[in-house]
Every structure is written in C-alpha cells, then in structure tokens.
Image: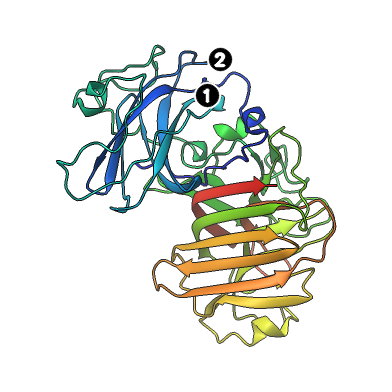
Amino acid sequence: MVAVALTLILAKIGSEAAYADGTPNAPSGLVAVTGNGSVTVSFTGSSSAGGSPILYYRVSVFMNGQDTELRADGAASPITVHGLTNGVTYTAKVKARNSSGFGTSSKPTPSFVPADDESSDPGTTTSTTSATSATSSTTSDTSSTSSTTSSTSSTATSPPAARAPGDVLDLRLWRLNLPVDSKGGTSGESALVKQPKVLTYSDTSFALNPAGDGVVFTAGVGGATTENSKYARSELRELSPSGSLAAWKADSGTHRMTVTGSVDHLPVNKPQVSAAQIHGSSDLPLIVMATGYCDARCNHDPRTRTIPPGTVRLLTKENGDTSSGVLDPDYALGSRYTLTVEVRGGVATLTYTNLASHFASTRSFGVTSGQGLYFKAGAYTLSNLKSDAASDYGQTTISTLSVTHTP
C-alpha cells in the first residue's frame, strides 16, 4: 500500500515545533538511485525512536520544494517510490513514525532525475552513506532502532498494512468531530477526538476503506451535532503547529489545502453533503458540497431545485452564501477528484479535476472575513431527521490530504 497523504506539509519556519513529543528523530545519510519513473532511497534510520518503537519509515518526493504526494512506506531502508515522471527534477525526504506520530523529516537528498534508461548513473548520493546500501536488494535494516511491530519476512519496499485512518492520512495537525456524543449516543454534543488519540483512532464513522488506501467519513442524519449546528458530521478540523486551533488570515500569507477524495453517498430527501470548508469562529467563507435535486419541501435554495432529478453537482457556497459556483455540473457519486483550495491576498482560488471523467474547473472569489480561519475536511451531512430517515447518511472518502501555510 502506498500510504497517502492528506500529508500536512509544514511551513519551514517553526516546522520543528509541529512534531509531537516522543516521536523519532530524523533519519540521515540519504542516497537516491533513480530508475524508470522511480527512485530508490536508502538511509540510516533514526538514532532515537522517541517514546515508542518505530512502526515504519516514509519516503516523500518533492518538486521545487513542494510535496508531490508521491510517497512510499517501508519497514527499513531502502524504500522505492514509483509514479515519478522521467526527466523531471526531484528531491526526497525520509521520516519515521511511531505510535505518537511522524517524527522530524530528514534533510532532502540532492536533486535527482528519473530516466527510462535504468542503466544510467544514479541521480544522487550523499557523503555520509555508502552507495552500496542504495543498490542492495536485501532488506537489512540500517536503522539503529528496530521496530517491534513489523514482520521481518516482508521486503523493505512493501509497506505495512494500514490499520487505522492515521496510517493513511497524516493527522498530526487535525482533530476530529464525531456524529456521536461522548457516551456514544446522539442526544449530546458531537464528541471530539483530540491529539494524540486521533493518530490511532478508528470507528464506524471514521474508518479505512476496504482497499486500505482511503479514509471513509460517515455521518448519519440523526447524529450528534456541534454547538450552533443542526447537522451531524464526521469531520477533521485544522490545528496549528503548536497544537492550538488554527487561525490564519485570508489577507496575509498563502494558505493551501489539497484533497483527493470522493463523495460516495447522499441522503435521499435532502441530498447534500459538505466535503471541505474554510471556516471562522462565526464566518463561513467556503463550503464545497455535493448536492442532488431537492425540491421546495426540503430546501428553499433555488440553485438546488434547478438540478435535474438523478443528477449530482459539486457546488461552492461562499462568504456566508452571498455567492456561489459550480465545480462539477454532472458528478457521479464515488468518482475520485482532486481539489486544491488556495487563499492568498484575500482571494480564494479553487482548482478541481475529476479523475474519472477528467472534467476540470477553476473558481475564484474574494474572502470577506477578517476572522482567524481554518480548513475542514470530511463529511458534514446537511440534512437531519426533519428531512430524512434515521437510517440515512452522508459519506465521503479522502485518500490524500495536505495543508501548507507560507508567510
């Protein structure tokens, strides 16, 4: 399994503070050997595992300093990442994970360029690691700290099987709202799963998909709700690197969230589910939602009543619903898409691509909120028992999730 992001890419300034206490320190001595659309990275493992044994290592590939979301996990050095583009210049970093989360990333490799000539010279070396370790076909562990949970019979390039959403998405800078209360019922307020529990948490509303490469968010229409909301959610809320609630300004810096995922199920009578948001303490600059046809009995919004029966659209609602747009006019439930939301200079720009139909669109609008803002992602089911039966629900899947903030 290629463990996928939703990796949170940390801003260079202050990034070290984002790593939880007790996580492994940075691997070292990276060597990158290119192949046809691939790179094999060998490294010396973390000298300190932190507060618990290392579970696995992750190699992430970067282009022009930005995370490409191409990565692979393995129990030990070397680890191979596939899916790279020949002729393109990349670098790579390695980090280790234990039960507390991912540790500090290594320094990047020197630049390397994959090529279809597999006999070409390796793209990079470092002065602190022998080149023989990168080309070896054995699975010997060069780390000074061994994992007690991985099977020694598996190859180094075979990642461990995912067991919880935190094995697929990097959840260090998120907390989770559940569609149940703290007692497991629905009469109280939505329960919170905070750090570090969310790193290993899983239940029926927040679980791996059958393939083990995505996280399924499910919220029933009769679920517990947050304060000042009448709808249930299984949804991640962004935190700052210090662990406090994120609060960034639309007119200062660049703020970007990229999600690869799908909307999988809508309630029957009021078929509306929010998959991503920009939120403030009281302002709501952006909702990205999937909606089907909904007549006047369940919704007075004329935009949804104009949707033909049997059709689903991905819409935006902007600045407290004072403006809106259409990202995908004919969305098939379960179709994977990639959505990037970037806020810079007081303007939000959305870039959308449906990976099944290849339909693409962009949308820009001015963000009027002056509040501290934050990203949200998951399933926020915009229906309740007034419209739909208790057995109905909203559901989304996220396979990659990344957030960056730059000054």
Q: What kind of element bears circle 1?
A: loop
Q: What kind of element bears circle 2?
A: loop
Left or right: residue 39 versus residue 49 is: left
Residue at x 44%, y 66% (from the top left corner): 335
Residue 237 percent location from the top left of the image: 68, 47
Residue 132 is drawn in which quadrant?
A: top left
The quarter of the rendered structure image containing the N terminus is top left
Does any portion of residue 345 appear in the rendered image? yes
Q: CA distance from mark 2 to mark 1?
A: 8 Å
Q: How many marks?
A: 2
Please say if 296 is above or below 228: below
Residue at x 70%, y 47% (from the top left corner): 407
The three-letter code of the residue at mark 2 reads Gly
- Judging depth in this view, the residue of 81 and 388 nearest the camera is 81
User: How packed is label 1: few (under 14 Cα within 10 Å), some, or many (20 or more)?
Assistant: some
Q: Are marks 2 and 1 in contact (CB under 8 Å)?
A: yes
Does any portion of residue 223 appear in the rendered image? no
Residue 78 is drawn in which quadrant?
A: top left
Residue at x 52%, y 37% (from the top left corner): 166
Image disc number at residue 99: 1
- Judging depth in this view, the residue of 178 and 99 nearest the camera is 99
Instruction: Decide which of tag 2 and tag 1 comes sooner along the chain.
Output: 2
Report which residue position mark 2 lands on.
51
Left or right: residue 160 versus residue 153 is: right
User: How packed is label 2: few (under 14 Cα within 10 Å), some, or many (20 or more)?
Assistant: few
- Judging depth in this view, the residue of 288 and 257 nearest the camera is 257
